[in-house]
Amino acid sequence: MLSVKITPYLSVSFKRKLKISMSKIKKIAVFTSGGDAPGMNACIRAVVRTGLYHQLEMVGIMQGYQGMIDDNFKPMTAHSVSNILQIGGTILKTARCLDFKTDEGMEKAYQNVKKQGIDALVAIGGDGTFTGAERFSNKYNIPIICVPGTIDNDLYGSDYTLGFDTATNTVIEAIDKIRDTAASHDRLFFIEVMGRDAGCIALRAGISCGAEAIMLPEVDTAIDELITKIENGALNKKSSSIVIVAEGDKNGGAYNVAKLVKEKINFYDTKVTILGHLQRGGSPSAFDRILGSRMGFAAVNALLKGETHKMVGLKGNAICLTSLSEAIHFHDFKLEDDLMEMAVILA
Ligand code: ADP
């Protein structure tokens, strides 16, 4: 007798689709907001294609909350997100929108969301974006799931944020190039990298590039201590020195640190490089492409399971959800002790 075999994968997938088709959510909008980060496009693609897989209508909101207020929505098809995995920035554009912080601005945004028939939102951004999302969904009772898209890696509820890995790799590539010049000319370079509150990029880039010293917002490094390190390096016949300074270092940035050091050391030709905005862009690393895809996929599935007011995160390589209020208000971020100790010993 002929029997029909259903593979386990198909049956699980079918059950999931059946359950999800009973969800009240039929139309989801996705947007990016705050600072751009590599991997946002991978996330948008995953949100759109996961929604389409579940036969939902998918919409993109241009320029984050600004587009919500300006009625700047666009239908998203599978084709709308073709060929974007490898591109940095965000195809939906992003903006900082002060109007959204006001009651009038939010009301305008809500009227547009309602007019579009949108049942739920996926927001990709940092803690400012989450704060707006939480206020909006509390006020108007719209389900929302957020994805941590920021190169700073400083959000509670996720070991990694989208874009951090790519930004660190970009910084490493730049420092490697500067090291060639530093070594050829026997120079001392002060390189400023992003990190106003968190020294994640500075610490990892410093270890990866063998920086002689790393100045972090989390640690008070006395200038005399730094000078001793540089002098010891010179005594050990180092022909060049690289000092990485995170933006938020308490001595006031790379130019200031260089000035203070120069007053006491004159055996090196001293230069300063501020890496600035080049750290934000660029093609996302494999890690960020996969992270963005996982988080986007998880965000839509979470909404369809009835979740709301949550941030998707990665903890020990597993996708997890954290309440938005915890993600916004908890700050348990701490640089790893072993990395800090190792950076000093290996330099
Ligand atoms: P990020 O999301 O990267 O932290 P911002 O702090 O600039 O970036 O926040 C992005 C946007 O989120 C802001 O431009 C604003 O539109 C919105 N936002 C931030 N804080 C609030 C708030 N308290 N209420 C409403 N919207 C907010």
Image: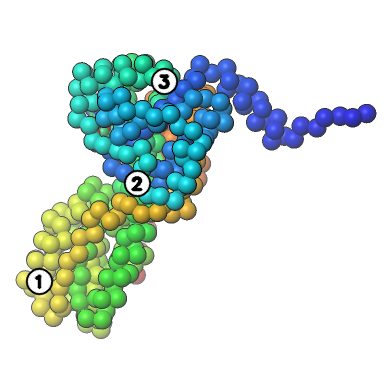
Identify which amino acid the numbered label 3 is placed on. Answer: Ile
Circle on res. 89: 2
Residue lying at 40% horizontally and 50% vertically, measured from the top left: 87
The reply to whether residue 8 is in sight is yes
User: Given the current orientation, which residue lies at the most extreme left position?
Assistant: 263
Q: Residue at x 39, y 19 (%)?
A: 116
Q: Say which mark, if any, is on residue 1.
A: none
Q: Name the N-terminal-most of marks 2 and 1.
A: 2
Viewer-side residue, 307 vs 27: 27
At 25% across and 53% down in the image, what residue appears?
Answer: 277
- Is residue 330 in sight in this rendering? no
Q: CA distance from mark 2 to mark 3?
A: 25 Å
| Percent of width and height locating residue 64 | 31, 32
Where is residue 335 drawn, in percent x and y? Answer: 32, 51
| Marks 2/1: CA–CA distance | 38 Å
Image-quarter location of ligand 1: top left
Q: Which residue is mark 3?
A: 118
Image check: 50 left or right of 255? Answer: right
Q: Amino acid at mark 2?
A: Gly
- Can you identify the residue that label 1 sits on? 262
Which residue: 43% across, 35% down? 312
Instruction: Report the quarter where the C terminus lies.
Output: bottom left
Instruction: Tell us which disc is closer to us: 1 or 3.
Output: 3
N-terminal label among 1 and 3:
3
Report x, y in % for residue 222: 15, 61
